[in-house]
């Protein structure tokens, strides 16, 4: 690890960092579509466990985005030193109450944004780094570069023909893509993709798996670390799958909605019905509640916000209009059901 301070730091924040009792440990996180630097004064920083591509130090091409997480107790900082420097935004006010994003809570923290660098002063960070920072970063990066960030898992054939999976939490997306990859398809992403037209780029991260019949043996054998929620664990995709790809041209879009109490089925869905679902469950501005963050990024400009959201929806419409659309209630742990899913996606 390398000790360094962020170059170009805001003067007042820079003084706080300079006065920290410990140096900053720096790493570079590769998200496939972009990189960011992650600095902290916390040894053995547990939030690194969310990522699968981490390098020591700050690479030159990771200077565009940066995150600095400071444990205020280790740094010896007081509320009086921090309160005047925090952002005056909706998100920063929520951070002060311990609410970060969507369903993620924790200790109160101070959020400070200076250009493309974000500073978090608090005491715990696992519920902030991936749940808040990475989701916001991918959404804003996509906004700036004419891309589309979606909450979705994905697999692909060896030729690069891909399928994306959408669904509510607990609907079986991870089990679905795990079954398909173990049957010979290649892993693309578990929870996030960034699309450039019809080409989806997977965002590398550990997978959130549950202590259930599908994953319990792996969790015990590998002694996997716990995720944020009880009964959930982090697993690198490499532990589960032999074949990995970083991008794919999307042909199939699937809403996964597994329930053993309902009839097993694979059915096609009309475009408008599919759009109504994924707009709410897959566009991060809706799925994670990032509308205030996007509005803040656009300097509170109503016209810019309306235009940006229109572009997101137009890109989503193009993706959905050019793909085969399915709704699946299938138990892929059953070999017969797995074959049916593979045939439908072929």
Image (cartoon, rainbow, N blue to C red):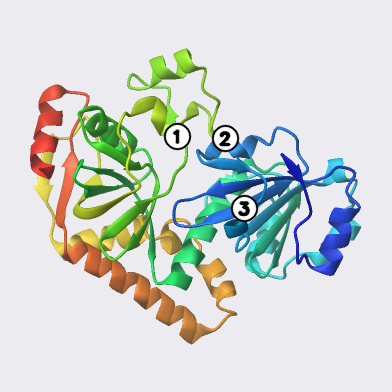
> Dot 1 lies on which element?
strand
* Image quadrant occupied by the C terminus: top left
Please say if 48 is above or below 215: below
> Would residue 127 appear left or right of 86 to someone viewing this image?
left
Determine the image quadrant of residue 199. bottom left
Give the CA distance from mark 2 to mark 1. Answer: 11 Å
Give residue 242's mark: none
From this viewpoint, which residue is outermost toward the bottom?
303
For image coordinates 63% across by 66% down, the residue present is: 116
Residue with the mark numbered 3: 59
**Residue hosting label 2:** 49
Q: Is residue 179 left or right of residue 104?
A: left
Which is in the foreground here, disc 3 or disc 1? 3
Along the line of sight, the residue nearer the viewer: 104 or 35:
35
The structure residue drawn at horizontal position 10% and vertical position 25%, both measured from the top left corner, is: 336
- Mark 2 vs mark 1, foreground winner is 2
Q: Badge 3: few (under 14), some or many (20 or more) residues near its Cα, within 10 Å? A: some
Position of the N terminus by quadrant: top right
Residue drawn at (35%, 55%), measured in percent from left and top? 281
Q: In 3D space, how far apart are the residues under numbered discs 3 and 2 (Cα atoms)?
A: 20 Å
Report the front residue among 4 and 216: 4
Nearer the observer, 321 or 102 = 321
Give the residue pinned by disc 1.
208
* Neighbours of disc 2 within 10 Å: few (<14), some (14-19), many (20+): some
Q: Which mark's residue is nearer the viewer, 3 or 2? A: 3
Q: Secondary structure at mark 2?
A: helix
Q: Quadrant of residue 314?
A: bottom left
- Marks 2 and 1, the one that precedes in the sequence: 2
Residue 30, image x, y percentages: 52, 49
């Amino acid at each position: 690890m390398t000790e360094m301070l962020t170059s170009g730091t805001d003067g007042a924040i820079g003084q706080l960092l300079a006065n920290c009792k410990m140096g900053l440990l720096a790493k570079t996180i590769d998200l496939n579509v972009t990189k960011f630097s992650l600095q902290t004064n916390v040894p053995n920083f547990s939030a690194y466990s969310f990522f699968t591509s981490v390098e020591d130090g700050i690479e030159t091409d990771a200077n565009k985005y940066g995150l600095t997480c400071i444990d205020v107790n280790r740094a010896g900082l007081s509320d009086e030193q921090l309160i005047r420097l925090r952002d005056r935004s909706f998100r920063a006010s929520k951070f002060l109450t311990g609410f970060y994003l969507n369903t993620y809570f924790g200790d109160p923290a101070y959020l400070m944004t200076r250009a493309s660098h974000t500073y978090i002063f608090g005491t715990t960070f696992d519920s902030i780094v991936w749940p808040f920072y990475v989701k916001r970063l991918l959404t804003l990066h996509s906004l700036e570069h004419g891309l589309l960030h979606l909450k979705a898992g994905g697999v692909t054939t060896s030729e690069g023909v891909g399928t994306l999976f959408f669904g509510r939490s607990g609907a079986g997306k991870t089990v679905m893509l795990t079954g398909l990859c173990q049957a010979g398809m290649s892993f693309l992403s578990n929870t996030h993709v960034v699309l450039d037209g019809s080409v989806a780029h997977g965002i590398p991260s550990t997978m959130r798996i549950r202590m259930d019949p599908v994953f319990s043996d792996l969790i015990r054998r590998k002694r996997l670390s716990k995720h944020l929620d009880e009964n959930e664990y982090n697993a690198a995709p490499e532990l589960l799958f032999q074949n990995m790809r970083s991008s794919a041209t999307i042909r199939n879009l699937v809403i996964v909605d597994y329930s053993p109490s309902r009839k097993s089925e694979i059915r096609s869905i009309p475009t408008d019905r599919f759009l109504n679902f994924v707009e709410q469950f897959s566009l991060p501005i809706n799925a994670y509640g990032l509308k205030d963050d996007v509005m803040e990024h656009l300097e509170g400009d109503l016209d810019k916000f309306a235009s940006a959201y229109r572009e997101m929806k137009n890109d989503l419409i193009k993706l959905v209009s050019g793909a085969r659309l399915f709704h699946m209630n299938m138990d892929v742990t059953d070999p017969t059901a797995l074959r049916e899913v593979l045939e439908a996606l072929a």
